[in-house]
Image (cartoon, rainbow, N blue to C red):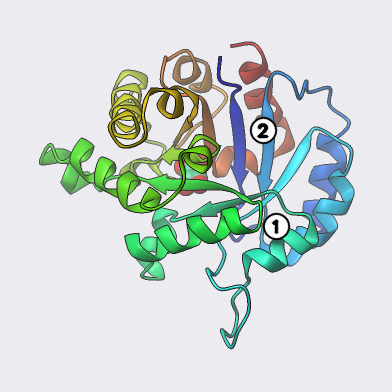
Amino acid sequence: MRKPIIAGNWKMYKTLAEAEDFVAKLKEKQVDHNKVETVICAPALFLNQLVQASKGTFISIGAQTMHEEKEGAFTGEISGHQLQDLGVNYVVIGHSERRQYFNETDDAVNKKVQAAFDYQLTPIICVGETLEQREQNETENIVSNQVMAALEGVSEENVKNSIIAYEPIWAIGTGKTATADDANDVCQAIRETILDGFGEEVASSVRIQYGGSVNPGNIEELLSKEHIDGALVGGASLQVESFVKLLEVAENV
Ligand SMILES: O=C[C@H](O)COP(=O)(O)O
C-alpha cells in the first residue's frame, strides 16, 4: 500500500505573512501523518520560516526548483545543498512552467534529480504533455520519455523514493481536469515504464501523483484510481480550507 502524498505548489503566490498564517492555521488541523504525507512547496523566500514553523508537525516543506551544482557563480539560483541546510525535504523538479518559461530541458531535469538525492531531498518530478501532443495520441510516448530521461543513471533505491507528478499541461490552472480514468491510464503507463527500466519492486513502490486543476470536488475520484497516489496542487493549495479538504479525502482512501 503506497501512502498518498498531497503536495501544494504555491508557485509565485503569497507574502511572508500570508504564508506564515497559512501554516499556523494548517498545523492546528488533525491530519494523520501515517495516512497521508503533506507537503507545501513554497517560494524560496519563505522556506526558512516555514521549515521552522512546521517542525514537529505533519507538514513537510519543499522548494519549487533547485540548481544542480552545490555552489558557484549562478546568480539568482539556489542549490540542493542550501535547501538541505535549511531543513527542506522535497523539491519540485521539471515543472512544465520551468520547462516552458525557463528552458529547463530533460537533461537539466536529470541533473537536478541526481543532485536532489545528493542532498537528501525527495524530488517531485513533473512530466506531462501539451494539448497538441494529446490530440496526436503522443501522450504516453512523451511522458514515458520524460520519465526515463529524468531517471537516467538514478539508482533503483532512489527511483523508489522519487515522486513522479503527471501533469497534463492543458489541465494546469485551466479548470480542465483529465478524467480520472485518463489520468490513471497515463499513471499506469508511467509505472510500466519504470517497471521496464527498474523492475517490479521499484515500480510497485514509486508514488505517482496527478496534477492539473485538482480540487475538493474531484480529488476523491482521482485518488480512488489504482495508479494515482496523490496530487500536486496549485490553485486549491492556496487556501487552508480547500487544502485541508484534499488532505481529509486522502486520509480516507
Ligand atoms: O504544480 C501544480 C500544478 O501546476 C497544478 O496547478 P493547478 O492545480 O492550479 O492546476
Q: Helix, strand or loop at disc 2?
A: helix
Amino acid at the residue labelled 1: Lys
Residue 84, position as x, y percentages in the image: 72, 59
**Which of the numbered marks, if any, corresponds to residue 188?**
none
List x then y, in percent, for residue 153: 39, 53
- Is 118 on the left-hand or right-hand side of 60? left
| Disc 1 from disc 2: Cα separation | 15 Å
Q: Give the residue at x 52% y 22%.
A: 219
Q: Position of residue 148 (x, y in %)?
A: 31, 46
Residue at mark 2: 243
Note whether 203 is above or below 51 in the view shown. above
Residue occupying image coordinates x 71% and y 28%: 244
Comparing 248 with 18, the one in front is: 248
Q: Residue furthest left?
A: 136
Q: Which residue is mark 1?
A: 14
Is residue 105 at least partly visible in the picture?
no
Circle 1 SS class: loop
- Judge whether 119 appears above or below 215 on screen: below
Residue 104's place in the image compared with 151, above or below, is below
Q: Where on the picture, by quarter, is residue 34?
A: top right
Q: Is the C terminus in the top left, top right, bottom left or bottom right quadrant?
A: top right
Residue displayed at 52% across by 40% down: 162
State the residue at coordinates (33%, 60%): 106
| Mark 1 or mark 2, earlier in chain | 1
Q: Give the image location of residue 78, x and y in percent.
A: 63, 71
